[in-house]
Image (cartoon, grey):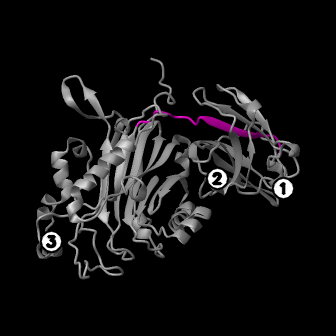
Amino acid sequence: MAATNPQTEPRSRTLSIHVVTWNVASAAPPPDLSDLLQLHTPNLNLDVYVIGLQEMNCGIMSLLSDTAFEDPWSSFFMDVLSPLSFVKVSSVRMQGLLLLVFAKYQHLPFIQILSAKSTPTGLFGYWGNKGGVNIFLKLYGYYVSIINCHLPPHMANNDQRLEHFDRILEMQNFEAQDIPNILDHDLILWFGDMNFRIEDFGLHFVRESIKHQCYSDLWEKDQLSIAKRHDPLLREFQEGPLLFPPTYKFDKNSNNYDTSEKKRKPAWTDRILWRLKRQPQADCHPPTLPAPHFSLVLRSYVSHMMYSISDHKPVTGTFDLELKPLVSAPLITLLPEGPCTTESDLLISYSLAADFLSSPWDWIGLYKVGLRHINDYVSYVWVGDNQVSFGDQLNQVPAPSPELGVPRLQQVGLPEGCCLLEGTEPVSSLVTESWAWGCGPDPLPVCPRPHRYTSASATSLRLRMGFSSFTIATACVLWWG
């Protein structure tokens, strides 16, 4: 019997995904979010962070500042996660709503951002104080949609909340993609400040139930739980058990529920839902089985009571996503050729997978190892119209001449600790990974047989030769679209 090609039969793998939702009530980031991000949890090796915030400061001056620079929350998360080998692969913001996706470096070859969009539902769909933001991506070949939402408040507006929920879902159409209907995507992660309340029971009963951790009666009157019992589509979205206290409304800077004159009744407003695509069965309607080789298991669903900067407590869900990769090799392979110095041009060879669609807007960027996000490039160079190619043949890109008006790689050199990446315009996010050589001011000796470091290898390898130090680094190919 012939041996099975491991590239055609990739092994199943498990990715740990940590989802955060938090209505921050215009507050700035606190000094420490280790508990929220599970940074010190033993035996927890996270692969992806998905972070959704609501009610970020969206005053005029704040929005102007955030347009020119990174907003304080994004900067905070990058400062914390980048040293842990996480890269911000995509983000989308609509007024006070922010959605961020971070991934470990070794997964970048297999993440492709397909779309990032906003759906306002405030003021009849013309204002973004309420609504949803979405990132649509491919993860190891599977289609994943991520939605962060903020639905209308107040007890009496339950019908309006459900209408906005449906509206956000209806607007997630992706006509330019292979799978335009969001309900056909393999996984939907939907979370945010959904603002569902607890019906019927009075304030005293609710608070006493919380005090004694008797949540079962409150679950029965939770508006989202009631809606799921009556709405077939909503029922397809799963949620973990609500074993934590209601996360709203608190006095700021305390763990006391609302003591103002309004004395709002506590509620589980902050939720994390998910939906797996269902496969049709010959004798079963509606379909009931999840997609083969693709399953999601909830490991933890908790609130974090220690944070008091907001009138909401943050909620996190930690998942294990088990999948059998549909793609097993990077789409693009980069190889800078020959000795490399800051005084000479660098010739870069690359090859494309047969199913990769190259573009005249492709470019190669120079990044420091440990990049925080895609705008961290040191320099870049266009591949050029004459270099667009198809198939798996080897292509070469010389550094452009100065008269072309394009930044030359050799003008900035290849600093120690840098790597090469390739992408296309317009800028949006990452698609796949290759590898590159970084070098110092002295030439890097040509190896008889180039060393290749795959995603399973160490992210970087430092070589010391005399007084010079060089870096061979895993580099990623960027897909901007």
Q: Judging from the image, what secondary structure is the residue with disc 3 in?
A: helix
On screen, residue 416 versus residue 242, left or right, reads: right
Query: Does label 1 or label 3 sit earlier along the sequence?
Result: 3
Camera-side residue of 148 and 473: 148
> Residue 441, labelled with which disc?
1
Please report whichever mark, 2 or 3, sits nearer to the chain's N-terminal start: 3
Toward which corner of the image does residue 56 lie, by quadrant? bottom left
Can you say whether 66 is above or below 295 in the image?
Answer: below
Residue at the extreme top: 1
Q: Which residue lies at the image location 26% right of the left edge and 34% below the top edge? A: 289
Q: Amino acid at mark 1?
A: Pro
Q: CA distance from mark 2 to mark 1?
A: 19 Å
Secondary structure at badge 1 equals: loop
The residue under label 2 is which amino acid type?
A: Ser
Spatial CA distance of label 1 from label 3 is 68 Å
Q: Quadrant of the N terminus?
A: top left
Q: Which residues are magenta?
A: 324-339
Report the residue marked by disc 3. Answer: 206
Question: Quick one: 401 or 444, which is closer to the camera?
Answer: 401
The three-letter amino acid code for the residue at tag 3 is: Val
- The span from disc 2 to disc 3 (Cα, nearest Å) is 54 Å
Marker disc for residue 460: 2
Determine crowd level at label 2: few under 14, some 14-19, many 20+ residues with C-alpha closer than 10 A.
Answer: some
Q: Residue at x 46, y 53 (%)?
A: 48
Q: Tag 2's secondary structure? A: strand
